[in-house]
Image (cartoon, rainbow, N blue to C red):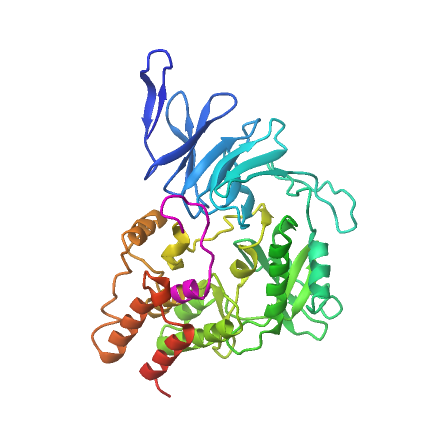
């Protein structure tokens, strides 16, 4: 709870303010004194009226770990927040709209955040002992001229002093060997609006000059920081490596293009948005065969030294002939880099139900100093959760309605409830459940490799 006290008498004058589901780690009073923002262990931010104690905005959802710091901007229009997993968000204080999101880097937990007096900078203190100051400036076009593109009320133009524009990134990717699709894509063949919006990207339907349908994914970051050249190089290499992946169960990246001033990734067009929708449209499909295809794609990916980082049915595409394609490598490419996203709805997405427990906990028993990075073992954990999703047509922990409930279950080492009507006592179903439990082992080193999972599936479903 939160209380407002009389500093002279020590008496509570407003409160207790109740609404958060767990400990409140940080509060900030608005410059005019009419509101209080609070950040909590329950991943959310709430805004309260200081006179009545009523909730006036929130909960703001987007963080995937406890919110350890909140602060109002000097004009009271924005709130900056920092969390245990190292992410920093800027919110519109009245609506909770995410205006800016910073992910990645090696700074660790964000313990403290604030705005500069002029509101043009944010500063945050990190678990590795560093204090980061980020300066916001006007966006620049590919030609280098200052743009005056409209900015939503309360939003900060998303740019830092040290930066690479979308055009710079495009040129670097082409220089690293990615195919430039500019001459082969029909500039007049794009859909009038995105066919899909989600996370930190939009997907547009387009056509090549020969009429072939393609999907163009535009990442919604405004720049990539050059603060850490190694991370910048790593992200470039990840995209380049993706262009070299050729496997029937992995989405093919055809090349890159500049579209509406943003970097676009070009892929073959898939008729089904994702595997979840495909299963709902084809309820009688062989679920074990789908799991085998999924494991085949991931096993190949791991043999190429790559990690997906965001596995779930929503990130698996389905071709016309029913072939699964692992797609949406955004988490692997972007979230370990120092990136800034602007005007995006909850870039982290709702992925807690598929996340390995070690991604939510500290590597140090006392201090939350360094976030655990996604690797092959966290992929295998998510593989098991996605198998459950494929078999049941429901998200993992479907019996738990809130992410906070899922977090509590993970902290208590509670695994998803066994769906006995689908995974009963028959040899095949029993083996599948044991395989899932193996993938969900709380000790990462005890989990199977993707190729081990594939081998067990082959034994359950021999051709």
- Where is residue 241, by image quadrant? bottom right
- Residue 141: give x, y in percent of width and height: 74, 48
Q: Is residue 367 magenta?
A: yes
Q: How many marks?
A: 0
Closer to the camera in the image, 196 or 96: 96
- Residue 253: give x, y in percent of width and height: 61, 70
Q: From this view, report whether residue 32 is shown above or below residue 55.
A: above
| Quadrant housing the C terminus | bottom left
User: Is 186 placed left or right of 82 in the picture?
Assistant: right
Residue occupying image coordinates x 32% and y 67%: 392
Residue 152 in view: yes
| Quadrant housing the N terminus | top left
- Where is residue 444, by image quadrant? bottom left
Q: From this view, report whether residue 22 is shown above or below residue 307.
A: above
Closer to the camera in the image, 318 or 167: 167
Q: Is residue 375 magenta?
A: yes
- Residue 13: give x, y in percent of width and height: 34, 17
Q: Residue furthest top?
A: 8
- Residue 32: give x, y in percent of width and height: 51, 21
Residue occupying image coordinates x 61% and y 52%: 220
Q: What span is colored magenta in the figure?
A: 363-381
Residue 260 in view: no
User: Is 113 placed left or right of 174 in the picture?
Assistant: left
Residue occupying image coordinates x 50% and y 45%: 87
- Secondary structure mostly seen in magenta is loop
- Where is residue 275, by image quadrant? bottom left
Q: Residue furthest bottom?
A: 463
User: Is 147 placed left or right of 318 in the picture?
Assistant: right
């Amino acid at each position: 709870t939160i209380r407002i006290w009389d500093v002279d008498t020590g008496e509570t004058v407003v409160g207790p303010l109740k609404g958060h589901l767990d400990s409140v780690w940080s509060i900030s009073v608005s410059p005019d004194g009419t509101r209080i923002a609070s950040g909590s262990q329950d991943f959310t931010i709430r805004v309260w009226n200081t006179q009545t104690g009523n909730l006036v905005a929130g909960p703001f959802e987007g963080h995937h770990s406890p919110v350890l710091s909140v602060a109002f901007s000097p004009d009271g229009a924005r709130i900056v927040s920092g969390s245990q997993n190292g992410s920093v968000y800027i919110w519109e204080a009245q609506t909770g709209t995410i205006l800016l999101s910073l992910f990645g880097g090696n700074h660790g937990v964000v313990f403290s955040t604030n705005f500069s007096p002029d509101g043009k900078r944010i500063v945050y203190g990190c678990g590795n002992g560093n204090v980061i100051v980020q300066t916001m400036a006007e966006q620049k076009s590919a030609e280098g001229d200052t743009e005056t593109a409209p900015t939503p009320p309360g939003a900060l133009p998303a740019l830092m002093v040290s930066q690479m524009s979308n055009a710079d990134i495009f040129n670097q990717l082409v220089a690293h060997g990615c195919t430039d699709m500019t001459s082969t894509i029909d500039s007049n063949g794009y859909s009038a609006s995105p066919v899909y919006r989600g996370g930190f990207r939009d997907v547009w339907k387009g056509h090549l000059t020969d009429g072939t349908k393609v999907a163009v994914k535009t990442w919604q970051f405004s720049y990539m920081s050059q603060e850490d050249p190694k991370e910048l190089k790593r992200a470039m290499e990840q995209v380049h490596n993706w262009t070299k992946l050729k496997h029937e169960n992995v989405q093919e990246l055809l090349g890159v293009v500049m579209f509406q001033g943003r970097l676009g990734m070009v892929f073959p067009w898939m008729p089904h948005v994702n595997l979840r929708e495909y299963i709902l449209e084809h309820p009688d499909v062989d679920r074990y065969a789908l799991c085998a295809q999924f494991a085949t794609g991931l096993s190949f990916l791991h043999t190429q030294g790559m990690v997906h980082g965001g596995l779930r049915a929503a990130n698996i595409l389905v071709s016309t002939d029913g072939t699964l394609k692992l797609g949406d490598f955004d988490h692997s490419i972007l979230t370990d880099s120092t990136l800034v996203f602007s005007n995006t709805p909850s870039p982290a997405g709702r992925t807690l139900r598929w996340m390995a427990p070690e991604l939510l906990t500290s590597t140090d028993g006392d201090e939350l100093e360094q976030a655990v990075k996604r690797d092959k073992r966290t992929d295998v954990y998510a593989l098991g959760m996605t198998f459950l999703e494929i078999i049941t047509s429901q998200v993992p922990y479907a019996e738990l309605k809130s992410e906070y409930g899922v977090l509590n279950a993970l902290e208590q080492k509670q695994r998803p409830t066994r769906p006995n009507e689908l995974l009963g006592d028959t040899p095949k179903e029993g083996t599948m459940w044991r395989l899932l439990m193996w993938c969900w082992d709380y000790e990462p080193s005890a989990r199977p490799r993707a190729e081990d999972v594939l081998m067990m599936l082959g034994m359950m479903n021999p051709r």
